[in-house]
Image (cartoon, helix red, strand yellow):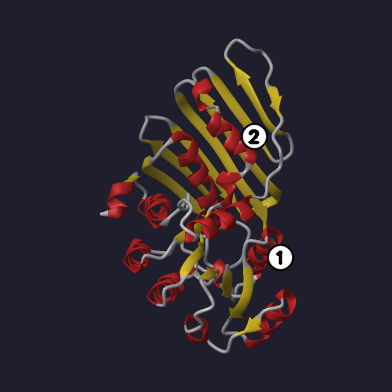
């Protein structure tokens, strides 16, 4: 499947590398407003550097767009692709607002093109194992999660990713959304959110530390901490059930503890390639084989959970997700 890459940030290279590992897609063109970036990308991946986005949209040999543009232009770029009959793989979050998310989702539906969102964390094999074995956990009651990275001295304040306008909610919208997604994937939909945000270490105008309390539809409560101000990269996800609990962290892998046991047992899972998996799922959906796991509707609701947390932190109150979606 011939694809064009749009937006030449660092994540575009991550996706392009995965496309090359897959072999199901071929990058035939790319575009960025920066001539230097698009020429560098074209040289690296052996594709054509288009002079404009319109040039890509008019090229009938290109079937799909791999879109890593800033959140604020997801609507404009995806709607244009849909009108040109091009399918879109869009990096999360789907947009910065619910209106934009719904507009681009509707445009893809009306044009009958596939829209898939990049939420690779839920595909990691430790989370897949928990999902496949949930019946052994009994009633799920609680969870705790942490997703942290060290960005001190590593951020570019001219980048949209680190500004309140480009990435409202800061660290929670940029990386925390991966783990709100995993929590909903494992425990079920979130009804309400309470949030607190702070800027403690990094320069700029955006939170680098954030915490959410999530109230799930089934009554369970979960907490998520996200940080760009920690000493190192770290991931934690503990899921507590009445009959069993699972513990995952970056350094020790996956363990689980069954009722009556005194020690947790390690769980051996094969390493996968989640980014390749989601891109291949997208390619298969374009060919009429299945549907994306994270489509426009699901990703709009995922965004709403984060926006509820941002609204809660701003207003100092518990916010229901349906209020954000209204």
Query: Where is mark 2, residue-wise?
Result: 248
Task: List the single residue furthest toward the left.
Answer: 326
Kindly state the secondary structure of the residue where label 2 is placed: strand
Kindly state the secondary structure of the residue where label 1 is placed: loop
Spatial CA span between label 2 and label 1: 29 Å
Query: Quick check: 115 above or below 159?
Result: above
Q: Residue at x 35, y 61 (%)?
A: 98
Q: Nearer the viewer, residue 312 or 1?
A: 1
Q: Earlier in the sequence, mark 2 or mark 1?
A: 1
Q: Where does the image place residue 93, in percent across and percent down from the top left?
A: 48, 59
In the picture, which quadrant includes the C terminus? Answer: bottom left
Q: Name the image quarter holding residue 269.
A: top right
Q: Nearer the viewer, residue 184 or 209?
A: 184
Query: Where is mark 1, residue-wise?
Result: 153
Answer yes or no: do the residues labelled 2 and 1 have beta carbons within 8 Å? no
Q: Residue at x 67, y 58 (%)?
A: 22
Q: Answer yes or no: is residue 123 visible.
A: yes
């Amino acid at each position: 499947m011939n694809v064009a890459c749009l937006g030449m940030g660092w994540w575009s290279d991550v996706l392009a590398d995965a496309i090359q590992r897959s072999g199901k897609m071929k990058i035939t063109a790319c575009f960025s407003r920066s001539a230097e970036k698009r020429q560098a990308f074209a040289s690296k991946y052996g594709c054509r550097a288009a002079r404009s986005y319109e040039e890509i949209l008019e090229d009938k040999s290109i079937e799909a767009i791999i879109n890593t543009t800033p959140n604020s232009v997801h609507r404009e770029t995806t709607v244009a692709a849909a009108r040109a009959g091009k399918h879109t793989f869009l990096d999360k979050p789907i947009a910065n607002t619910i209106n934009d998310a719904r507009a681009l989702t509707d445009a893809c539906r009306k044009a009958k093109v596939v829209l898939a969102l990049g939420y690779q964390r839920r595909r990691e094999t430790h989370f897949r194992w928990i999902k496949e074995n949930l019946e052994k956990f009994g009633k799920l009651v609680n969870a705790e999660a942490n997703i942290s990275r060290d960005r001190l001295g590593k951020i570019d304040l001219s980048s949209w990713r680190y500004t309140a306008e480009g990435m409202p909610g800061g660290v929670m919208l940029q990386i925390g959304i991966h783990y709100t997604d995993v929590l909903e994937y494992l425990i079920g939909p979130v009804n309400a959110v309470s949030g607190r945000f702070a800027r403690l270490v990094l320069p700029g105008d955006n939170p680098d530390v954030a915490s959410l309390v999530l109230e799930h539809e089934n009554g369970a409560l979960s907490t998520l901490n996200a940080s760009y101000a920690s000493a190192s990269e770290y991931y934690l996800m503990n899921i507590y059930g009445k009959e069993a609990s699972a513990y995952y962290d970056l350094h020790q892998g996956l363990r689980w503890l069954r009722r009556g046991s005194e020690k947790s047992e390690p769980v051996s899972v094969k390493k996968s390639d989640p980014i390749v998996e989601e891109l291949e799922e997208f390619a298969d959906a374009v060919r009429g084989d299945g549907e994306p796991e994270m489509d426009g509707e699901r990703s709009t609701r995922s965004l709403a959970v984060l926006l509820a947390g941002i609204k809660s932190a701003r207003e100092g109150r518990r916010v229901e997700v349906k209020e954000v979606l209204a």
